[in-house]
Image (tube, coloured by chain):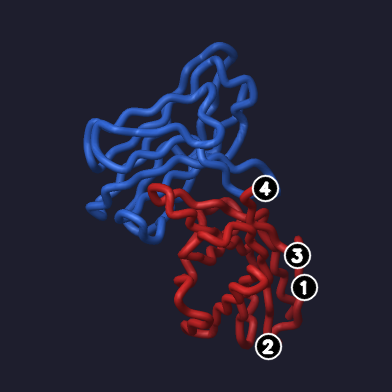
């Protein structure tokens, strides 16, 4: 069935290191992907998005990579900071009235 | 939270009671969404609306109802038919087909 999943439920990194969070998706018709950050007790916050006609997009300290061949999405965070500690979700747009399918999430923990 | 407000922040429901969660946006977005999030889980879609006076069921609509009388507002009612309502409820809005922006959430607890 259609699903978006994450390889690792938890990720612990040292402050200053780079973080890589992975996501697999199964619907090859999806044309739009989004990464969200959710801090405890708060709503998800948009980080970065990418359309299926691109394979890389960069923001401030974040990069999203899309590999359509293996249906894989990743979020790279450069120079990870304590404020980056949160749960990160990838979401897939099925092109069905704007509906998104969310993955389970990866909890990122940054050690000082 | 991007011009989307949800109230209240915490809500307590008694057995057999209907409760309504508020969601308002001032982003002029056509589409609005309600999600449920259980501890340690992702988001599951309850209902969504692409335009005023129209809405569709999501993946877990049973025990919930919505209305969309105004573009800015998309209230969610958790009815007594929802037997396990304890969760974190998130509202989102978007322009058609674009990024969804989320409100701060309402945590519903059962007494």
Are the residues under badges 1 and 3 in a single subunit?
yes
In contact (CB < 8 Å): disc 4 and disc 2: no
Picture residue at 31% right of the left edge, 54% below the top: B96
In contact (CB < 8 Å): disc 1 and disc 2: no
Provide the residue designation for mark 3.
A7
| Chain B shade | blue
Q: CA distance from mark 2 to mark 3?
A: 23 Å
**What x and y, as percent, mark residue A100?**
49, 52
- Residue A70: name its quadrant: bottom right
Q: Is residue A26 left or right of residue B69?
A: right
Provide the residue designation for mark 4.
B41
Q: Secondary structure at mark 2?
A: loop
| Chain A shade | red
Q: Chain of mark 3?
A: A
How would you rate the neighbour count of disc 1 (Cα within 10 Å): few for under 14, some for 14-19, many for 20 or more? few
Q: Which mark is residue B85?
A: none
Picture residue at 58% right of the left edge, 62% below the top: A90
Q: Secondary structure at mark 4?
A: loop
Are the residues under badges 1 and 2 in a single subunit?
yes
Are the residues under badges 4 and 2 in a single subunit?
no
Q: Earlier in the sequence, mark 2 or mark 3?
A: 3
Q: Is residue B73 above or below residue A90?
A: above
Q: CA distance from mark 4 to mark 2?
A: 28 Å
Q: Is residue A12 left or right of residue A95?
A: right
Give the number of the mark in front: 2 or 3: 3
**What x and y, as percent, mark residue B67?**
32, 28
Q: Chain of mark 4?
A: B
Provide the residue designation for mark 1.
A12
Residue A79 can be seen, yes or no: yes
Q: CA distance from mark 4 to mark 3?
A: 14 Å
Picture residue at 55% right of the left edge, 38% below the top: B107
Give the number of the mark in front: 4 or 2: 4
């Amino acid at each position: 069935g259609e699903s978006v999943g994450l390889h690792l439920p938890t990720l612990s990194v040292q402050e200053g290191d780079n973080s890589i969070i992975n996501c697999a998706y199964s619907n090859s018709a999806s044309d739009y992907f989004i990464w969200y950050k959710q801090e405890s007790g708060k709503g998800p916050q948009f980080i970065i998005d990418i359309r299926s006609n691109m394979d890389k997009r960069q923001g401030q300290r974040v990069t999203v990579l899309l590999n359509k061949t293996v249906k894989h999405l990743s979020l790279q965070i450069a120079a990870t900071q304590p404020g980056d500690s949160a749960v990160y979700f990838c979401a897939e747009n099925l092109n069905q009235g704007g509906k998104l399918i969310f993955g389970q999430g990866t909890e990122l923990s940054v050690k000082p | 939270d991007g011009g989307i407000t949800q109230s209240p922040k915490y809500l307590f429901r008694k057995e057999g009671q209907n409760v309504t969660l508020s969601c308002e946006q001032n982003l002029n977005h056509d589409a609005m969404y309600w999600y449920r999030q259980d501890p340690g889980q992702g988001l599951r879609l309850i209902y969504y609306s692409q335009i005023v006076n129209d809405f569709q069921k999501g993946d877990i609509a049973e025990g919930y109802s919505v209305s969309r009388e105004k573009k800015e507002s998309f209230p969610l009612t958790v009815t007594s038919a929802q037997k396990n309502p304890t969760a974190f409820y998130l509202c989102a809005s978007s322009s058609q087909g674009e990024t969804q922006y989320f409100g701060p959430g309402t945590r519903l607890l059962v007494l």
